[in-house]
Amino acid sequence: MSREKPAANATTSDKPAGPSSATVEFLKHIQLGLWGFFVALIGAGGGAWVAHDRPSQLESAARVAASMIGIIIGAIIAALAIITRACDTAFLEKAKAADRWKPEDPILPISRHLKPFFTVIALGLLSGVSLMALSVISSCTSTNVRMAFSAAAGFLSFWTLAGLLPAMGTLIHFTYLIEESVEPRQENRGPPT
């Protein structure tokens, strides 16, 4: 086996992007809304209340929340599939042409329309991790620790739920963009008889 020495003028940009750069790129597209934060605060309060006043119901609440988070992430991935399926070459060419005529409401880059979906996925994953942690510590720790974990799980779960509305609004808006980009077919018909 012979090992070749790297060229003296090789740059670091020749290296493939690693997982850390993909994570950084994903985090650039996270978009957290302020109203979702307030809904999440309600979830944190509810989670702390359940952990303090009704600890016997904490595990069942965590199971329900985990099921909802799984359903939400599945729905978001389905919506992303709908959007990415629509992004064929013909649509992108029409979008580029439309952006020249309507610069105040650009269609491109498409990643701008995907930010709410990425946000819900990130929040859903964090929520799932916090719910797993809550299920592990729920019976073996003090009330204050249980309240803190329950508040964090409630905060992230409710923020995930609140993130659905902007994501669905974006899906509706994107559907309108697809409809606007479709040109009616011109059928060759003879003169009316």
Image (cartoon, grey):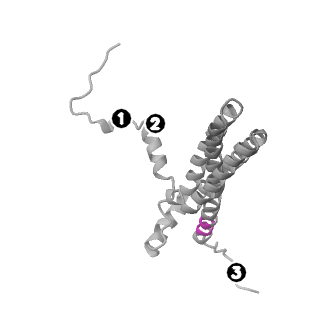
Q: Is 118 in front, or is 42?
A: 42
Label 2 or label 1, whichever lies nearer to me, is: 2
Residue 28 higher or lower than 190, as above or below: above
**Quadrant of the image for the C terminus?**
bottom right
Dot 1 falls on a residue whose secondary structure is: loop
Query: Would you call the spot at circle 2 few (<14 residues within 10 Å), some (14-19), or many (20 or more)?
Result: few
Dot 3 falls on a residue whose secondary structure is: loop
**Quadrant of the image for the N terminus?**
top left
Compared across the picture, whether 80 is left or right of 107 comes to right
Image location (x, y in percent) of residue 122: 57, 47
Q: Earlier in the sequence, mark 2 or mark 3?
A: 2
Main secondary structure along the magenta-highlighted residues: helix
Residue under label 1, please give it.
Answer: 15
Residue under label 2, please give it.
Answer: 19
Residue 190's tag is: 3
Q: Is 143 in front, or is 168?
A: 143
Residue 164 higher or lower than 47, as above or below: below
Is residue 128 in view? no
Residue 45 higher or lower than 181, as above or below: above
Q: Earlier in the sequence, mark 3 or mark 1?
A: 1
Q: Is residue 60 magenta?
A: no
Determine the CA span between mark 2 and mark 3: 60 Å
Q: Residue at x 46, y 70 (%)?
A: 99
